[in-house]
Amino acid sequence: MSSSPLLVTGLPRSGTSWTGKMLEASGEVVYVNEPMSLSRPPGGSPGVLNARVEHRFQYVDPDDDAIWRSAFADTTTLRFHPLAELRAVRHPYHLARGIKYGVGFTLGARRGRRAMLDDPNAVFSARWLTERVGVRTVVVVRDPVGLIGSWRQLGWRPHLDALLAQPALIRDHLGEDVDRIRSAVESGDWLTQMCCLWNVGHRVIDEFRELDGITVWRYEDLASDPLGQFEQLYDWFGLTWSERARSTIDDATSASDDRHRGFAWNGWSRTAFRRMDSKASVGRVDRRLNPDEADRVRAATADLLDRFPRRVADTPSD
């Protein structure tokens, strides 16, 4: 277990980047940011993952996975493909980022560090990655009002058609959801589509949660009690809970400059991670959806959300 690669996943804006950065504080992992993303960056980097991603929420068909097995075997053992990366370079930033990853992979492998994939795009392939590639996986679940409000702020669309375009995903996991997804697409209503995505994604996550090698954690718990919850998560992953890790996480979750800003890039990795007062962020009323919209979301998602109970009770605000 202690040598297994790590996967942090969940629907986008569930807090995967933040969670991954807190795990990176161990000093025992090499952070690999969204190798299955359709966007370059962070995806479209054959030096990092030498396989072609064709869909948002790419599903790896376990009946036809030879290319993916080979690609992820290299990624999770920190074997970089410099020539493949060079052939894909179209911008100086891509070259600089490729060099950064090439050096990081090489040094990480020499130092015995473990690959840690932070990738919400891998949420539907989490079972395959866990069972076939041997990663240990944490799936982060976020309250749907907060998650959907974040998508609203960023102007993102759910792209449900990407799910319908993957026959193997429908065959293995979404057969009972096809009519629901099509109805949401035909409605043309963004909020209906987002609730559908949250429900479909979390129904599949609920299927995965009983598997060996997969654990599910609520974002609100990690944010409410970062030191206590991450100490447990470190133990589950076989990472060392050192004073360095504790201090780094305490500093990163105690900042007072959180302003509910939009997407914030961070360094070469271009992640959504930023320092924040995590406890305050959980207690803050989310106003990115109006009250009627928030009520619609809660009504549409309540049954599934109840399957992911909190570990940490909310602290009453003053």
Image (cartoon, rainbow, N blue to C red):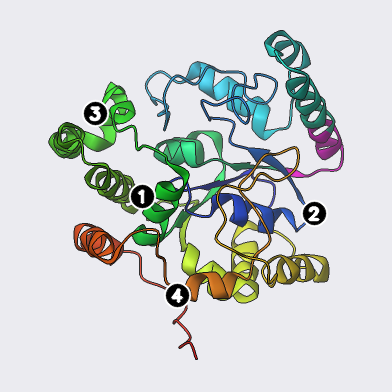
Q: Are marks 4 and 3 in contact (CB under 8 Å)?
A: no
State the CA–CA distance, disc 1 to disc 3.
16 Å
Instruction: Name the residue rendered at 20%, 35% in the picture.
Output: 188
Query: Label 3, on which residue?
Result: 171
Of pointers 2 and 1, the one earlier in the residue sequence: 2
State the CA–CA distance, disc 4 to disc 3.
33 Å
Out of 133 and 202, give the one closest to the viewer: 202
**On residue 27, which mark appears?**
2
Instruction: Name the residue rendered at 17%, 33% in the picture.
Output: 178
Compared with 31, 279 (above or below) is below
State the CA–CA distance, disc 4 to disc 2.
26 Å
Query: Label 1, on which residue?
Result: 205
Range of the magenta residues?
A: 104-114
Q: Position of residue 117 (x, y in %)?
A: 61, 41
Which element type, helix, strand or loop, lies under badge 4?
A: loop
Tell me, yes or no, whether the highlighted magenta stretch contains residue 110. Answer: yes
Of pointers 2 and 3, the one earlier in the residue sequence: 2
Of pointers 4 and 1, the one earlier in the residue sequence: 1
Instruction: For label 4, count other residues whose C-alpha is less than 10 Å away and answer few (under 14), some (14-19) or many (20+).
Output: some
Compared with 300, 86 (above or below) is above
